[in-house]
Image (cartoon, rainbow, N blue to C red):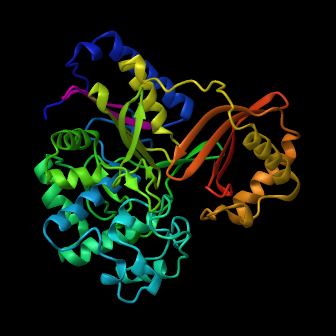
Amino acid sequence: MGLTSARPATAAAQGPVLKRIDSFVREEMERQKVPGVALGIVHRGKAVLAKGYGFANLEHRVPVGPETIFQSGSLGKQFTAAAVMLQVEAGRLSLADTLTKFFPEAPASWGAITVRHLLTHTSGLADLEGLLDPRKDYTDEDFARFCYALPIEFPPGSRWNYSNTGYVLLGIIVNRVAGTFYGNVLRDQVFKPAGMTTARGISEEDLVPHRAAGYRLVNGEVKNQEWVSPSLNTTGDGALYFSVKDMIAWDAAVQARALLTPESWREILTPVKLSSGATFPYGFGWMLDERDGKPLHHHSGGWQGFSTHYSRFLGEGLSIIVLTNSAQARPSRFVDGIAALMSPALAVPVPAPIADTEPQVTTKLAALLDQVRSEGLQEAHFAYVPSGFFPERAKAYQEQLSTLGPAGKLVLVQRRTLGDERLYTYEVPFGTRTYVYTVGLAPDDRLTIFLLRPK
């Protein structure tokens, strides 16, 4: 592609704007304690920036460049979705196929789960993240048997809940129907034709030029990423290597609707319809939101010392890719800040009080804070029990509220409807500190989400 470290190609990205972006990125890296960042910006079809900041390897003091290789994390899910759609186009599977077709030893309940449910995180299968032994090697059969024992948290298709399990299973399905590793499918049918010359599956033993090291913060100190077994880096939930130059090439393919048929792209970028008829803003490996009233397609990832984010602001013809080598990094903050510098209309709205037309809900949720402080959260409070929430996170919220003391008045700053759920976000003072309190409610008013964090 012949990109230099920074090549402005539009008036919006020239001179002062690029300087402000540079300053912002460096300041945000310092604030978040991120060792290295690779940044790609595409505007109106032209790559205007492909640049590295900081270090790809702290021990050897190797700087990040446009060619530095990062791990994808869950940003790799959109590539797994592409591999699945290639199999659909080849007639090897259908989105309506049930899982028992590919996993005959699965529980009978899997007969209600389809390939589409896996792609859209509506299968109901509990998330296996954090449940696998990171030191153990698993075969595809081992992964499948592990998933057979996972609970189904809700009727398939009835709601959306992010689950890496579905994409692990999708990778196995592609392996089986294609007769080769899904990473080979991506190499031959996505990476090569898209011009993603250094994108590939993760390998610990191969020599990978320009490979970055991953890092994590432990008590504020930078440490190397934790080791995991090689098999955990072969799964379809996000186990790829790529550079920001690779992702710029992928952005061009997405913009051109290349590699796949128009029908496949339509499926990938259409919000999922739940069994109630309501829609949720997720397609196949893409979040489908809005910013400034215009479409925003994006996804993030995090795994083994890396965090990534890729956003396409369709109304502005603007794509931003941020790859970092820090487990604790929040690359979406880089993306949102850069987007606002490119176009002020893309700035994330500052939370402000809105009209509270449901005071009875606010009263109930204020009482819930007191109840959590005194009695803790119980599984009966939830319509769908969040995977991994009990007992540790539930206990942590009770302890947190016990130390904070009584809550002040709840001030509503956002109300959203996602699928069949209503999400309420409040700012609530505890003494001199303000916290952000978010609760999701199912149609029967039981909880789907409970979050409390400092503002």
Closer to the camera in the image, 103 or 20: 103
Q: Is residue 358 left or right of residue 134?
A: right
Q: Residue 12, percent across and down?
A: 28, 15
Relative height, residue 49 to residue 97 (above, below):
above
Q: Residue 236, percent across and down?
A: 34, 64
Who's the residue at 73% across and 66% down the image?
A: 380
Q: Is residue 224 left or right of residue 194?
A: right
Dominant secondary structure of the magenta stretch? strand
Who's the residue at 35% across and 56% down the image?
A: 77
Q: How many marks?
A: 0
Q: Is residue 93 left or right of residue 354?
A: left
Relative height, residue 334 to residue 68 (above, below):
above
Relative height, residue 418 to residue 448 (above, below):
above
Q: Residue furthest bottom?
A: 105
Closer to the camera in the image, 129 or 139: 129
Residue 264 inside the magenta-drawn segment? no
Asked whether the viewer can see residue 63, the reply is: no
Relative height, residue 412 to residue 152 (above, below):
above
Who's the residue at 88% across and 41% down the image?
A: 405
Q: Quadrant of the N terminus?
A: top left
Q: Residue 115, percent across and down?
A: 33, 69
Q: What is the span of residues highlighted in magenta in the rendered image? A: 36-52
Q: Quadrant of the C terminus?
A: top right
Q: Is residue 82 left or right of residue 144?
A: left
Q: Residue furthest left?
A: 193
Asked whether the viewer can see residue 291, the reply is: yes
Locate residue 445: give its quadrant.
bottom right
Q: Residue 207, percent across and down?
A: 25, 58
